[in-house]
Amino acid sequence: MTRIVLLLALIFASPVLASAQDLPVVEVRTAFGISNYLHSDIEYTAPTWLFAVRVGKGAIAFEPELALAWHEDTERFDNGTLTPTVQVSSVRYRSFGVNVIGRWGSRVSGYAGGGVGAYSERRRFTQTSGDQVFENDRTQGPRAGAQLVGGLDVPVASRIKIFGQARYEIRSFDDPGGGSVVQGFAGVTFVVK
């Protein structure tokens, strides 16, 4: 009698188990890295944080993402007077994009893809010389752009992976050369499923 009940339970549960296997895998990915801006007037590398959710099954996945980068700089100019000129600048970059990712490999897997995004930046600039203060605060965007993505996923536990990723972003279709960025990331993936 027990065998019959187990057999019936297995028969009725098999479509449920099969449909559960057909569900896409959901991964939450976060990483820190650097952004190297390819502008001729920008000479710095900025720390960057990336958050993404990858949803897919098999070789193809979709990946909405959010990224933040920031840079602050203070310069002091002694121009032969008692009161030097001090310049303080800060830049905050934000982006939201959606990528289509192709994956290959079994245990260690490579991936590559790309997509479109919206990019914005806020620049604050303050120059102080004695009693004179000049301030400028401007926001650009959001502007439409695109990104190319490639990397490697390495499992370290049943639901945890580490990854490395390289990216190239064109942050404005209106100015592809002036708005481009090369990025490198290292991060962790949590498989939600």
Image (cartoon, rainbow, N blue to C red):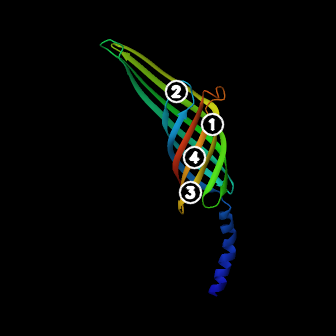
- Residue behind mark 1: 117
Residue shown at the point (51%, 49%) measured from the top left: 187
- Residue behind mark 4: 165
Q: Quadrant of residue 80?
A: top left
Residue shown at the point (42%, 20%) measured from the top left: 126
Residue type at numbered disc 2? Ile
Disc 3 is placed on an element classified as strand
Residue type at numbered disc 3? Val
Cα distance, mark 2 to mark 1? 22 Å
- Residue behind mark 3: 154
**Of callouts 2 and 1, which one flags the residue occurring earlier in the amino acid sequence?**
2
| Numbered label attached to residue 42 | 2
Residue 190 place in picture, x, y as percent: 53, 55
Task: Please name whichever residue, 172 or 6, is drawn nearer the observer in this view of the structure.
Answer: 172
| Numbered label attached to residue 139 | none
Residue 44 place in picture, x, y as percent: 49, 31
Disc 4 is placed on an element classified as strand
Task: Please name whichever residue, 120 or 69, is drawn nearer the observer in this view of the structure.
Answer: 69
Q: Residues within 10 Å of mark 1 (few under 14, many from 20)?
A: many
**Of callouts 4 and 2, which one flags the residue occurring earlier in the amino acid sequence?**
2
Cα distance, mark 1 to mark 3? 27 Å
Nearer the observer: mark 4 or 1; the answer is 4
Tell whether label 1 touches label 2 (CB within 8 Å). no
